[in-house]
Image: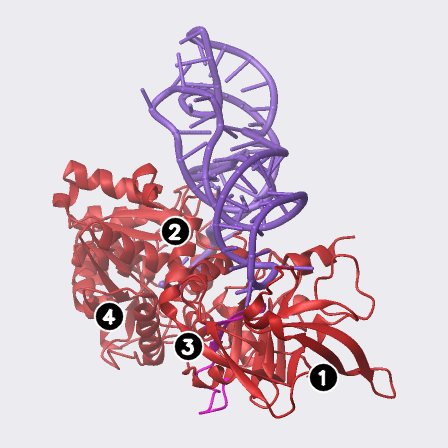
Amino acid sequence: MSDRESSSVDFVRSRVAEDVKNGRFGGKVRTRWPPEPNGYIHLGHAKGIWLSFGIAAEFGGTCKLRFDDTNPTRESEEYVEAIKEDVVWLGYTWEEVVFASDYYEQLYEWAVTLIKDGKAYVDSLSREEISAYRGTPTEPGMNSPYRERPIDESLDLFERMRAGDFADGAYVLRAKIDMAHPNLNMRDPVMYRIMHARHHRTGDRWCIYPTYDWAHGQSDSIEGVTHSICGLEFENHRPLYDWFLDQLGVWHPQQVEYNNLNMTYTLQSKRNLRAMVEEGIVDGWDDPRMPTIRGIRRRGYTPASIREFLVRVGVSKTEIMVDRGLLDFCLREELNRIAPRVMVVLNPVRVVITNYDAGATETFDAENNPEDPRAGTRTVTFSREIYVERDDFMEDPPRKFFRLALGREVRLKHAYYVTCDEVVRDQDGAVTELRCTYDPQSRGGTTPDGRKVKGTLHWVSAADAVPVEVRLFDHLFTREDMVNLGDRDFRDFLNPDSRTVVTDAMAEPAVRGLQPGARCQMLRHGYFIVDEPDSEPGRPVLNRITGLRDSWAKAGRKP
RNA sequence: UUCCCGGUUGUGUAAUGGUAGCACCGCAGAUUCUGGCUCUGCUAGUGGGGGUUCGAGUCCUCCCCGGGAAGCCA
């Protein structure tokens, strides 16, 4: 890991490094991360955050959180607060929170400048006409009949657009570039449109709003941004970004585009995410199955595991589909080191230790984390009646089944070896109880004769068991590629088993002491977090973040 | 027969024109008081054709494939 820094860096970082080295931009690094406050952010956004904030920090520069709030009909304060929280949770610190709307006046003045220079004009064409005049990717567009409108007239019209003299759509301000340009973005792009809409910050002060193309680069310039890092979808906009800045003759940042993050089994389009919430497919934006930052936070993923995931994925300009399992790997890697172990039986079956005194109990010291001796120990209580996992017993075990079966001896973690002598069934033949004997010599998990047992089971003393609710999560979708669905709908691929609720799991008492938000490893099951919204004192609800690697289950899947 | 950007093992990402490496996944084994962790080994790649060169993943050229672009969304 230490040689990662020295061995190679991604292309964005190497470009920044080169600019710093050459003294471009005075050797400074200033970035911004510019979300539109029109929804909750997700893992895909986390990559942009990691790049813009991360690079600024790595180069001793600064990064602002800038809300690109140029479309008042879709934006709200609710989202700006949510996004701020999410950025903080991911572990980043902004130099300042700013808004594109802070620059509306300057943007307006610059627009006037361009009009005066004959580089922008007010157009009277309708939305449909503008579209028709634009041409197509293979055919040049046509000039608007209003393109040569006298400068004074455009100036007057633009002023009156601002003053509210016109209805929505009556006029737009356009840059005067080239209607035959091979890049469609250069065919006289719209800079301002009339929208009589209340803005979440500027209220009713404006009824004309700048488009992204007009607002974005100029905002970067005002902030003295050096590297404007954005997604590949803006690559075709870079010539326009550069054009505006060049016409104005102002500070000119370098736009750099990176590949967006797609992951298997996950959907990240805001529109579809919203549909899932609105249709009740999930419980909300923070449903633990959602790829939103709020969702994965509630699910239990850590900020560090997300950052590590992003580092491992890296950056390039290739379209990618990353195996979501890599995120789980990063989570396990972190939690294996720090998560306290606990024993929880998800699907309990009663075990009676027939040669253990009824009413007797004894305690064992159980290590909290074998990876970290400093984590110390806790006490677990053993008694005549315990629960073990129903799946840990088999009547007719296959050859490599190392768990409980008639006549088989296994270790109860931290406690004794037990051998199964008898199976008790109900009338339907279902196992209701296992009767076992223990070897008093095996106390602590080893015997003087040194004999080996292949299996070690987790267990909970029946008298001490704490009932808990456990929620097991799986992919929301059954299809790996949820990005390219063709003419199919995401609803065609919903996984009916994306959430399994276990209401009667039996946990060792230590689980009751876990605070909401605390993470643990359930021995042999996986990593869990105590759900914050739904847990109540003494009655924890646990979300499975991800399972442990399971080579036994894997072997079972083989033909 | 438009413009822009891409194409390296299954996935992601490296390689001043000089031994195609790393990680995840997968497989096999060792170890183990978690069928976890750890350790060892294995599998598998430069889209294609020409060219330049002593030598090409890298440079040139043609082609193929994928993505983006015709919002008054960002």
The label nearer to you, 2 versus 4, is 2
Above or below: residue A381 compared with residue A538: above
- Which chain: red? A
Residue receiving disc 4: A101
Mark before the other along the chain sequence, 1 or 2: 2
Residue beneath the point at 23% across and 54% down: A56
- The extreme front residue here reads A448
Magenta-drawn segment = A520-540
The label nearer to you, 4 versus 3, is 3
Percent x, y for residue A57? 23, 55
Above or below: residue A301 compared with residue A16: below
Q: Label 3 neighbourhood size at 10 Å, few (<14), some (14-19), many (20+)?
A: some
Please state which of residues A104 and A182 is positioned toward the viewer in this rendering.
Answer: A104
Q: Label 2 neighbourhood size at 10 Å, few (<14), some (14-19), many (20+)?
A: some
Q: Quadrant of residue A126?
A: bottom left
Residue beneath the point at 24% across and 78% down: A202
Mark before the other along the chain sequence, 4 or 3: 4
What color does chain B have in the rendering? purple
Percent x, y for residue A87? 32, 68
Residue receiving disc 2: A311
The label nearer to you, 3 versus 1, is 1
Residue beneath the point at 60% across and 70% down: A442
